[in-house]
Image (cartoon, helix red, strand yellow):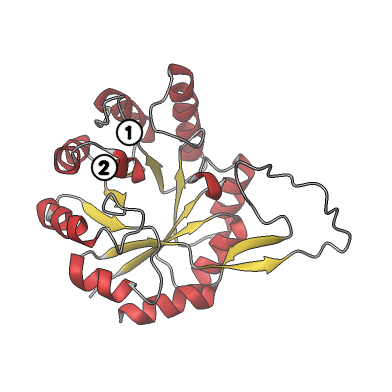
Amino acid sequence: MNYKLEICANSVASCIEAQKGGAYRVELCAAIPEGGTTPSYGDMVVARELLDIKLNVIIRPRGGDFLYSALEHKIMRRDIEMARQLGVDGVVIGCLTAEGEVDMKRNRELIDAAGEMSVTFHRAFDMCHDPFDSLEKIISLGCSRILTSGQQQQAEQGIPLLKELVKQAGDRIVIMPGSGINRHNIGVIAKETGAREFHLSARKPVESGMIYRNPHIKMGGAAVMIEEYAQQVTHAELVRNTLDALD
């Protein structure tokens, strides 16, 4: 089977490791603990300079829900224009209405801004009221793929819906399972759903080089828990092991 791995990369370092490990594509994000937000200009530039594989970037101005204001929508359009100018291969978007429907008008405007770039509809799909109706709407918009966990916390739990989505989508759009996928469960998810593209992080903690560590202060605050003195970085070996598990 011709399987493809997309690595959710939280840094340019993770992008490089993903490439070394044999990934087909990366999705570059900032603020992973918040579900991913638009990466910086510098991240996009350097990633594009160093990567030979496909580079997608998430376009998301903040964490939280996917109901965006007019101001946030304007920001997303500008970010897409910047990504396009930098030679990014694709953008990852998703706008919903207050009723949990796919926002056809706002998504269309973002897709128009993307031009020739591929467009992935991200896990905003998992917050949609009706996944089957939403699938048809996203297909009509012309998106290349949908990233989804099958409307469950993790893709392994969402296998029943993922299987139905793959069947309904046919060859009209790619259904790409993501969330909690690793080398231990990817084989089962592939077999049960029929999916051919998968989204995962393949990260390990890398200890900080800091010697002095102030125990009284946390930069992340209490709302979003982060490890102050370790970075989560994609490892090439984990990517390769996951590909081997598919084979």
Residue 28 shows in the view? yes
Q: Residue at x 18, y 60 (%)?
A: 160
Dot 1 amino acid type? Ile
* Residue that label 1 marks: 111
Residue at mark 2? 143
Q: Earlier in the sequence, mark 2 or mark 1?
A: 1
Classify residue 63 as left or right of residue 89: right
On the image, which quarter does residue 246 sit in?
Answer: bottom left
Question: Which quadrant holds residue 209?
Answer: bottom right
Instruction: Classify residue 106 by image quadrant.
Output: top left
The amino acid at mark 2 is: Cys
Label pair 2/1, CB-CB below 8 angstroms: yes
Q: How many marks?
A: 2
In the image, 163 versus 121, the foreground residue is 163
Residue 219, position in %: x, y? 73, 44
- The answer to whether 2 appears left or right of 221 in the picture is left
Instruction: Give the vertical position of 91 relative to 183 (above or below).
Output: above
- Which x, y percent locates residue 178? 35, 58
Q: Residues within 10 Å of mark 2 (few under 14, many from 20)?
A: many
Instruction: Report how far apart the C-alphas of labels 2 and 1 lie in the structure.
Output: 8 Å
In front here: 6 or 221?
221
Residue pictured at 51% horizontal, 34% vertical: 62
**Nearer-the-camera pick, 13 or 226:** 226
Residue 122 can be seen, yes or no: no
Q: Quadrant of the C terminus?
A: bottom left
The residue located at (38%, 30%) in the rendering is 113
Crowding at mark 1 (Cα within 10 Å: few <14, some 14-19, many 20+): many
Left or right, 54 with respect to 156, comes to right
Which secondary structure, mark 1?
Answer: helix
Horizontal side of 155 relative to 14 (left or right) equals left
